[in-house]
Image (cartoon, rainbow, N blue to C red):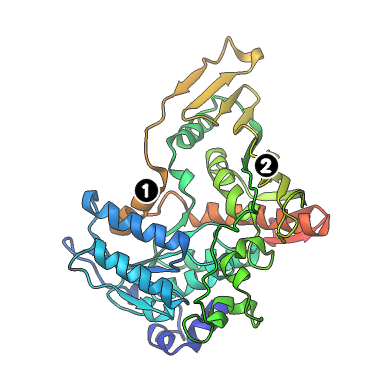
Amino acid sequence: MSSSRRHFLKTSAGFAAAASAARPMSAASYRRILGANDRIHMGIIGVGGMGTGHLHAFCDLKANSKVAYDVVAAADVCQPKIDNAVRAASEKQPGVEVKGYRDYTDLITREDIDCVLIATPEHQHHINAMDAIYAGKDVYLEKPMTLRTEHAFELRKVVQESDRVFCVGTQKMALSKFRDARKLIADGEIGKPVWSQTSYCRNSTTGEWNYYGIDPNWEPGKNLDWDAWLGWMGPREWDPKVYARWRRYKDFSTGIVGDLLVHQMTPVMFALDADWPTLVTAHGFHHIDKDMENHDQVNMSVQFADGHTMIVAGSTCNEIGLETMIRGHEGTLYLNGTNCVMKPERLFVDEREPMDIPARQVHDHNMLRMDWMEAVSERREPFSSVELGTKVVVAVDLATRSMWDGRAWSFDLDTMTAKPV
């Protein structure tokens, strides 16, 4: 039995949703059947900065949306955050009843809720998502998909064995230039892709993620459930810095790699139709922000099963990064700008025409949100899939392990497990 399944069955609400635990799970048995005119009911789990941002975005999209949906519930371990989310959703959706929950299992066991958006800290992603799928909900899960490789494969199995619509929230997947790049590569326009590069670099004078404020009114045991927030990482002494700025701490986040670099790596891997990462080396260092446990400078190399190599750089102490590009034997794709640009290699200029494919202008984050909503309505797979999300986690997790123990890490395709080299 998975760690998520054990956790869910321990809750009183979980018993109701897991009535068929003794036999293979069919999530369809728990979901309500939507008619053509029914509105989709959504809940949001985790209403901190990102979750509240999603809440406002979905409410704002409703007026012009082609999909009929209502945000009807919010869950968080922190009561002030719940109160803020319920108030905002109620004000933006007149006539819609919005309820708040301190225990997210009370939200997912509501039979009238069809789908959930999960924006909790990384260490809770796999638990929250699997519980929601077991309860019959479609899921939008913030990136990175999970904190660790083993969590990713556990969640991947649950998604694949269900009939749920599952989306990983990496918004640059919605940019048309990466779809154009994928088609050009598939059509052989650049020959064999041999290596690629990308980065996410920014700078800070006060320390990355320190902009998340600490509320002096937080009181564990009264208006905040610290033990529930810790989950499988507990028990630990209350630390408001960890709670508010968890991306700075290696037990709870991979820092630059999982929070920032996945934005860039994921769409490039999509364009490549990348195989599984098989060998990763990475180096991390503390140059400026020495108080942050995670590194403020990261450089990594990811080799895939087909031999393609991706070079990735991340920084929170210098904002000049690498240009995003994919190099092929016969041409190179330039993806740093708005458009998808292909320039032939000098030896192939007589055989290949240069191309500059204009972008279809979209708000990438809103497009990803609406693709998920439409996928929920149409019962199809969103374009940010669990399979790609799992491959990204393998690269991220192996890079993180490599940085911390000073060795390269490999991924065995036969056993689907990681080990140091």
Spatial CA span between label 2 and label 1: 26 Å
Is residue 32 shown left or right of residue 76?
left
Q: Which mark is residue 312?
A: 2
Q: Secondary structure at mark 2?
A: strand
Residue at the spot of label 1: 366
Residue 36 in sight here: yes
Is residue 168 shown left or right of residue 122?
left
Q: Is residue 195 above or below residue 156?
A: above
Q: Secondary structure at mark 1?
A: helix
Residue extending furthest toward the top? 350
Residue in the image at 47% along x and 30% along y: 338
Quadrant containing the N terminus is: bottom right
Tell me which amino acid carries mark 1: Asn
Is residue 336 shown left or right of residue 113?
right
Across and down, in percent, residue 346 comes to 65, 13
Tell me which amino acid carries mark 2: Val
Q: Is residue 376 above or below residue 14?
A: above
What is the quadrant of residue 136 in the picture? Answer: bottom left
